[in-house]
Image: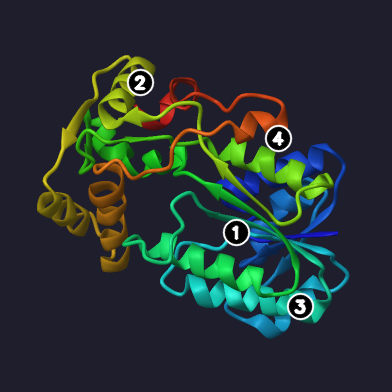
Amino acid sequence: MIFLTGATGSIGGHLARILGERGVKARALVRKAADGDRLRALGHEPVTGDLADPDPLAAAMAGCDTLFLLPPPLQNQTELEANALAAATRAGLSRVVKISAGDANIASPVPWAKAHAIGELALHRSGLRWTILRASAFYQNLEKLNRPIRKGTLPIAAGRGNAAFIDAADVAAVAACVLLEDGHDAATYHLTGPEALTMKQIATALTAARGKPVRYLDLPTPLYRASMKLAGVDRWLRRGLVAQYADVVAKGHDIAVTHEVRRITGRAPKPFATWAAEHRDRFL
């Protein structure tokens, strides 16, 4: 049985649906009992717990053989991943499929990218069979900017840099294949969308989807940082987003387009323009 973490989020929610449609029952970790209703309706077994509490976590994993590890981007991400791996080992699981970041690097200025690199190293040393899915940033992240987008601006400090964003549903589709097929042990897959787009091109696609103009507003880094502070974004996340866009994307260091989604799933990843059109109501 597969033990799912992050099953109520963007990737995990899609993965739970795919597994349910294929008749695969999983056990899914939820922080609140009420969050388990949708998972139960898909045929899964929700268990209440938290990655921050490793002892009950090991008990919750009992009887499972594979851990789907989707750590949340929090300041204690490294600790949470370590807890999950320790619990998996204690519970006798043999395999881990981990979601990581496309720019995972121990020296990264992006805190969650650095944390993912540390998590990958811990997984390599765990003695468990492993597969790592390094995904680029998700289209869904733009929904956090829906307020300014609704007003006609896309305010990011990314200069003229481009990024090969991906639909979280495509990451979930790859994860389902890896979880249910043989031949993926000790593999690291880099997952991207079908194209690398500048923020101006993303704004153009949002304009077409909305039927109303969206203008890319290339903010100076200090102003970008200040705007997030005014919006209530905490200091840790502000620091990470500034590094992600001003240091990585703007300087051309983001992950290049790959074709792993098509190779593994047999279908091409969804273009951003298609995703934007399908979710236009969120930006109106």
What is the x, y in percent for residue 48?
Answer: 69, 70
Mark 2 and mark 3: Cα distance apart in space: 46 Å
Viewer-side label of 4, 1: 4
Mark 4 and mark 1: Cα distance apart in space: 19 Å
Q: In which quarter of the view is residue 126 placed?
A: bottom right
Mark 3 and 4 residues: CB-CB less than 8 Å, in contact? no
Q: Residues within 10 Å of mark 1 (few under 14, many from 20)?
A: some
What is the x, y in percent for residue 284?
Answer: 34, 27
Q: Secondary structure at mark 1?
A: loop
- Please name the amino acid that badge 2 sits on: Ala
The residue depicted at 31 percent of the width and 41 percent of the height is 145
Q: Secondary structure at mark 4?
A: helix
Mark 3 and mark 1: Cα distance apart in space: 17 Å
Would residue 44 be found to the left or right of residue 232 on screen? right
Q: In which quarter of the view is residue 141 placed?
A: top left
Numbered tag placed on residue 205 in the rendering = 2
Residue of label 4:
264
Residue of label 1:
70
- Please name the amino acid that badge 1 sits on: Leu
- Give the mark nearer the N terminus: 3 vs 1: 1
What is the x, y in percent for residue 170?
Answer: 60, 35
Locate the N terminus by quadrant: bottom right
